[in-house]
Image (tube, rainbow, N blue to C red):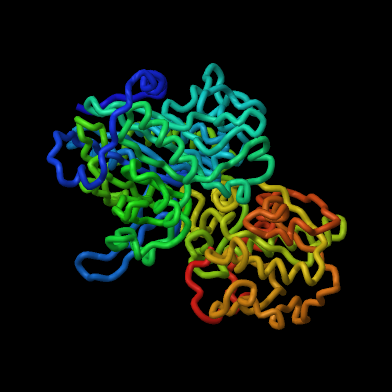
Amino acid sequence: MLSVRTRRSALAVVAAAGLVGTLAMPSVAQAATAKPKTVNLQLLAINDLHGNLEPPAGSSGTIREVDPVTGQVVSTPAGGIEYLATALRQARIPADDSITVAAGDLVGASPLTSALFHDEPTIEALDKLGLDVTSVGNHEFDEGSAELLRLQDGGCHPTDGCYEEGRRFKGANFNYLSANVTNEKTGKPLLAPYWVTRSQGVKVGFIGVTLEGTPNIVTAEGVKGLKFANEVATINRYAAELKAKGVNSIVALIHEGGLPASSTYNYDCGAAGQGISGPIVDIAKKIDPAVGAIVTGHTHNAYACTIPDPQGVPRSVTSAASFGRLYTEIDLKLDKTTGAIVRPSVKAENHVVRRTVEKAPDMTELISHYSKLAAPIANRPIGYIASDINGRGNGDPEKPLGDIIADAQQAGLAAADKGGAQIAFMNPGGIRSDLVHKQSGAEGDGVVTYGEAFAVQPFSNMMQVKTLTGDQLIQLLQQQVSGSNEASPKILQPSKGLTYTLDMRNKGAERVVVDSIRLGGAPIDPAAKYRVAANEFLAGGGDGFPAFAAGTEKLVGASDLDVFNAYLGANSSAAAPLKAPAQDRIKVIGPGGDLD
């Protein structure tokens, strides 16, 4: 019999948990050698959905896997909330009990069908999906903490109001957790730090955190008045609190992740996690052994690994890629005597959300409802392309769509009264999709609609033009591959005319070959001044680029989406569609890989 859980009933469980005495936590060794009476619990996990209700387009809507017949790596179409709902519902059927969890970024940077309504459609879909609990992610703060609280508690949008007469948004029936996000004045968590429920008589607790570096990747306004604490210290603090309340089965939901050595979804990380790197490795090694499993996100990668805990015992660490293309099934055994997760029993596996299963009718109805409301805006043609122009799904340091976005920004702000931009840069993480030649509706192949352009640039960040010295411009390029970006470089997409060489055989700032930097064929003069354009997030120093924040003579322009749409309209037609540019602005020597 599957448990029925709601946010309101679960909160009562949290309150009641404080009345229960402490149970001794057994050692992992005891759990391994004893033969306890256990019950089975299934966790189903997702992360980084980003409001992708409809199947993601282009390479963003595929999963790389090894074809069992040919042995070749193939890209399989995957994702879409209609298929995800069916897959999860089918997976729950054989389970003794099942809890559905997530690791943040369920909303934010969303396609138009969700974003036009401030992601209310995605919250409604996740309720129908049966989500029980999730950590917050960095994108949950895109519109600020007040909007995140509204998504949890309900109510009409403070500016746009209710979208349909007589209908009020009810808020999420699942639980958002933000253990390491506190009000800087009161010190209290913005949302509940943990959630406790019961599975067949055993109490199970979930602690939710986002990455400590969230303020570095969200606009200042989005995290205004908030503090973000260390992930490990926060989880260990609340794990101790849960144990003191008699909750010994604990799962951590962390919006931070890792980088597996292979991009195939079912890559074997190895028994001790040797096949995965990135921030989650150090985090997992320091989290209290009482935490029996760790569900992660943020990096949009797929993995089901084990990483040793502080006692050297392997512990499950998982991530289900992004955009609803995968879900993770984690099978646990809970000791009914001690209330603990029997660690050696934990088994985790990712499953592809294949588009060959039947669509969930309730999700089809929800998408249809909001698509009709959005259609007058979403279906408006704004440009034409000759072929696919890859952005989000392109693993090269320089991306064709990144070049076009940067060109659009430079062109839109080149006039003296608009900022006099000589150069523009686009942050790779802000490119959220591809432009796909095949029609998504009835617009015709090669037609770019407003909704498709919005999916690429969904933030509506205002553009800025700043003055940087040549020396600051060199520093900016070096910061792509040094400082906070050294381990995982963030290669900015440059507008045409700017060229340089990256030598990835070197380390840190030395990876940028300074003598190779040219603008219009001329070397950069360290003492000269240059007008440089970027969206407000990047121009404010986001993503680890303090050189941008040091720029002067700021001029604010139109939104990034507006200049992108204007460029597509001015530079393409049905008779002369826009072609993908040559990737010839950044020369890479040595290992390039997926650097964004």
Q: Quadrant of residue 408?
A: bottom right
The reply to whether residue 575 is visible in this rendering is: no
**Residue 286: image x %, image y %?**
42, 50
**Is residue 82 positioned above or below 528 on the image?**
above
Residue drawn 51% across the image and 32% down it: 120
For the N terminus, the image quarter is top left
Q: Quadrant of residue 57?
A: bottom left
Q: Is residue 14 left or right of residue 386?
A: left
**Residue 222: image x %, image y %?**
64, 40
The reply to whether residue 31 is visible in this rendering is: yes
Residue drawn 33% across the image and 47% down it: 327
Q: Is residue 161 left or right of residue 82?
A: right
**Is residue 277 positioned above or below 163 on the image?**
below
Q: Is residue 424 left or right of residue 359?
A: right
Residue drawn 80% across the image and 59% down it: 551
Total numbered labels: 0
Judging depth in this view, the residue of 583 and 591 nearest the camera is 591
Q: Is residue 541 left or right of residue 251?
A: right
Judging depth in this view, the residue of 22 and 141 nearest the camera is 22
Judging depth in this view, the residue of 88 and 470 nearest the camera is 470
**Residue 371: image x %, image y %?**
49, 37
Residue drawn 69% across the image and 82% down it: 516
**Residue 76: image x %, image y %?**
33, 59
